[in-house]
Each structure stands twice: as structure tokens, then as C-alpha cells.
């Protein structure tokens, strides 16, 4: 609701590449390295499940990212890139995860055509569905002038829309992002009164804070149900830098591809690499796996990586942004 669509359009190409190509690159890099590492540690994890792990750990978590960005003084364009990527790569990552888990379960024939069809159905269908329910919500908001009812309509959009998208085998996260952008920009300007905007903003800011709190509580409660083995800690210790390296590559490739046609700040790669926080989305996807030894291994390693990401990266991203911002300012002064 609070993401400016005009700012997002200005950064559309880098966000699109980061959310699609970047996630695919990271999924296969992490998956391939995980397969090698698990064999080395004696943890029998099939290659397809290693790719599943790569898919669930590659997307950045929008709740964690947005929560951290509120406390930093990052430039507006940088915040737009990080926020936009986290919103869309979340949906893309979930789609890839669902495709891979379907293949792992034997429900989906492994052909390029079937995989492409499932990906396009989930992703493109999610975009179309988001536009449809966003449009319906927009017309409902325009026809009503009662802020309490309008707040409930936005809540129904999220809960009912996500459930319906899932029932139709479309991407719920992508649908909600598209609908939210439509209502948060066009709907706010033309379908809501001033008092409605105030109450809608207050309500969703409260929900945002509650979700952040729930995220950390759920991550803490995971300790009670996980059985940690020494090999899991060893795997996580090696996979943390491996995931960061995959993130570095998945950010660098889109930036280098677009650098010929547009200019980027010097610190965009290190900031977006370190600012790519993993959070509740990764844990939730790991929890959704069917019971079995693969689930236990993936869940334990995912939990440890998420804890590192939120605590270490989350607590230091402000310093990284300040460092590169001061470097950019110094370079600009030197040129003049």
C-alpha cells in the first residue's frame, strides 16, 4: 500500500531482473552447492530437494526487509529497489518452490514444457488475478463512503483474494502485490477520502507491526520443534557464506547487464547483497514440506540461516548503507 508506483516504474527493469533472473541464478547456485556439501557431510539429500532448498532460501522476505528499511536512512531510489525486489522475488520464489516440490513428489512430469507451463500459469495468472480483484476492490471503494467498511474491504481483499488465488492454483503472493500496488496508488488517490486513507494507513501499519512481531516469535518457537544435529550446524556454517555469495552473483548479473544503459550508485551491489534478508517466508516454505528426513534437514538449516540473516545482517545493514553513502558522497566531492 505504501510503495510508490511511480518510483517503482523508474526502477522496473532492475527490479524485474532481480526478482526473476536473480532468483533463478541463486536457486541453482545454492542448490548445486548444497548437493555437494550434503554428500560431503554424509547427509543424503536428493538433488531435487537441494534445488527446493535453493528456491526457498533465495527470495528476500518483504516483512523483514521493510521492517529493517524503516530504521535506515537509505536513499529513496535504493529503498525502492530493495522493496520492489523483495515484494516480487518473494512471489517468484514461491512459484519456483511449488514447481520443484511438485516435481519432487512425482506429481509433475519433468519436461521443459510442463515446467514452463506451470511457472507461467502461477506467475502470469497471479498478475492477472491481482489486477482483477484489485479492480473489483477499487470500484467497491469508490462506491462506498464509510471508512470502517472500506478498511474491512481491504482486509477481505488480502485474506479472501489470497485464498481464492491458491484455490485456483495461481500465485497468491504475486496477486496480492499487484492488487496492493493498484489500491495503494490509484485507489488511494481517487477512491478514498482523506479520513479513509488515514484509517486504512493506520490499520495496515498496525498489521505490519504485528506481522513483524509474529515473525520473530515464530522463528523463536521453531527451536522447540527442531532437532539439531552437529552436521546441521556444520552445514549452516558453510551455507551462510555460500548463500551470500549466490546473492552477490544474483545481484551483480542484473546490475552489470543494465549498467550499459543506466547508472547505478557505487554501493548498490554490496548494499543489496547484505540487505537481502531471509525471514519468515523461507521458514514457512520449509515447514510446508511433507514429513520426512529431507524436511528435517532443510528446516534445520533454513532456520539457522534465517537467524543469522535477521540478527547479523539486519543489525548491520544500517552501517553498510552509511558506509557506502559516505563513500559515494566523497567520490562526488572529489569529482567536483
Image (cartoon, grey):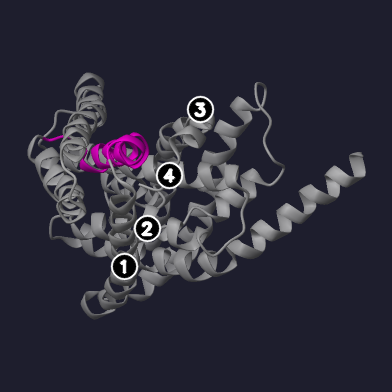
Cα distance between the residues tagged 2 and 3: 23 Å
Cβ atoms at labels 2 and 3 below 8 Å apart? no
Q: Of the residues under marks 1 and 2, which one precedes in the sequence? A: 2
Which mark identifies residue 63?
2
Cβ atoms at labels 1 and 3 below 8 Å apart? no
Q: Residue furthest top?
A: 113
Q: Which residues are magenta?
A: 169-191
Cα distance between the residues tagged 1 and 4: 21 Å
Decide: few, some or many residues near mark 1? Use Cα within 10 Å; few <14, some 14-19, many ≥20: some
Nearest to the eye among marks 3 and 4: give it.
4
Cα distance between the residues tagged 1 and 2: 8 Å
Q: Of the residues under marks 3 and 4, which one precedes in the sequence? A: 4
For the point 22% across and 26% down, the residue is 128
Front residue (pair 205, 212): 205
| Rendering quarter of residue 3 | top left
Which mark identifies residue 13?
3
Q: Of the residues under marks 1 and 4, which one precedes in the sequence? A: 4
Q: Secondary structure at mark 2?
A: helix
Regarding residue 43, the answer to whether it shows in the image is no
Q: Find out whether residue 33 is within the magenta segment.
A: no
Which mark identifies residue 247?
none
For the point 26% across and 21% down, the residue is 112
- Residue 285: percent from left, percent from top: 25, 54
Regarding residue 243, the answer to whether it shows in the image is yes
Q: Secondary structure at mark 3?
A: helix
Cβ atoms at labels 1 and 2 below 8 Å apart? yes
Which mark identifies residue 3?
4
Which mark identifies residue 215?
1
Q: Find out whether residue 175 is within the magenta segment.
A: yes
Amino acid at each position: 500500500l505504501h510503495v510508490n508506483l511511480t518510483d517503482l516504474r523508474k526502477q522496473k527493469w532492475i527490479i524485474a531482473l532481480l526478482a526473476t533472473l536473480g532468483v533463478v541464478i541463486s536457486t541453482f547456485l545454492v542448490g548445486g552447492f548444497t548437493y555437494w556439501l550434503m554428500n560431503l557431510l554424509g547427509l543424503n539429500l536428493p538433488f531435487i530437494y537441494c534445488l527446493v532448498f535453493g528456491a526457498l532460501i533465495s527470495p528476500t522476505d518483504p516483512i523483514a526487509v521493510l521492517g529493517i528499511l524503516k530504521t535506515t536512512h537509505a536513499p529513496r531510489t535504493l529503498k525502492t529497489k530493495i522493496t520492489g525486489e523483495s515484494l516480487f522475488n518473494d512471489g517468484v520464489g514461491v512459484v519456483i518452490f511449488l514447481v520443484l516440490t511438485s516435481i519432487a513428489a512425482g506429481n509433475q512430469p519433468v519436461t521443459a514444457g510442463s515446467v514452463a507451463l506451470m511457472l507461467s500459469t502461477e506467475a502470469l495468472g497471479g498478475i492477472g488475478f491481482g489486477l482483477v480483484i484489485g479492480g473489483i476492490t477499487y470500484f467497491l471503494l469508490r462506491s462506498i463512503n464509510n471508512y470502517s467498511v472500506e478498511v474491512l474491504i481491504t482486509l477481505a481483499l488480502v485474506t479472501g483474494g489470497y485464498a481464492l488465488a491458491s484455490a485456483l492454483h495461481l500465485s497468491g503472493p504475486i496477486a496480492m502485490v499487484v492488487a496492493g500496488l493498484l489500491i495503494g496508488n490509484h485507489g488511494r488517490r481517487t477512491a478514498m477520502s482523506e479520513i479513509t486513507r488515514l484509517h486504512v494507513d493506520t490499520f495496515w501499519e498496525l498489521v505490519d507491526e504485528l506481522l513483524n512481531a509474529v515473525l520473530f516469535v515464530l522463528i523463536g518457537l521453531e527451536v522447540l520443534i527442531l532437532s539439531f544435529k552437529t552436521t546441521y550446524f556444520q552445514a549452516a556454517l558453510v551455507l551462510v557464506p555460500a548463500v551470500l555469495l549466490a546473492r552477490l552473483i544474483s545481484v551483480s548479473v542484473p546490475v552489470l547487464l543494465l549498467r550499459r544503459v543506466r547508472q547505478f550508485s557505487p554501493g548498490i551491489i554490496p548494499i543489496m547483497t547484505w540487505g537481502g534478508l531471509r525471514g519468515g517466508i523461507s521458514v514457512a516454505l520449509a515447514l510446508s514440506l511433507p514429513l520426512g528426513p529431507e524436511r528435517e534437514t532443510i528446516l534445520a538449516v533454513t532456520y539457522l540461516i534465517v537467524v543469522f540473516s535477521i540478527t547479523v545482517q539486519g543489525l548491520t545493514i544500517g552501517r553498510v548503507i552509511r558506509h557506502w553513502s559516505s563513500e559515494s558522497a566523497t567520490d562526488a566531492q572529489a569529482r567536483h
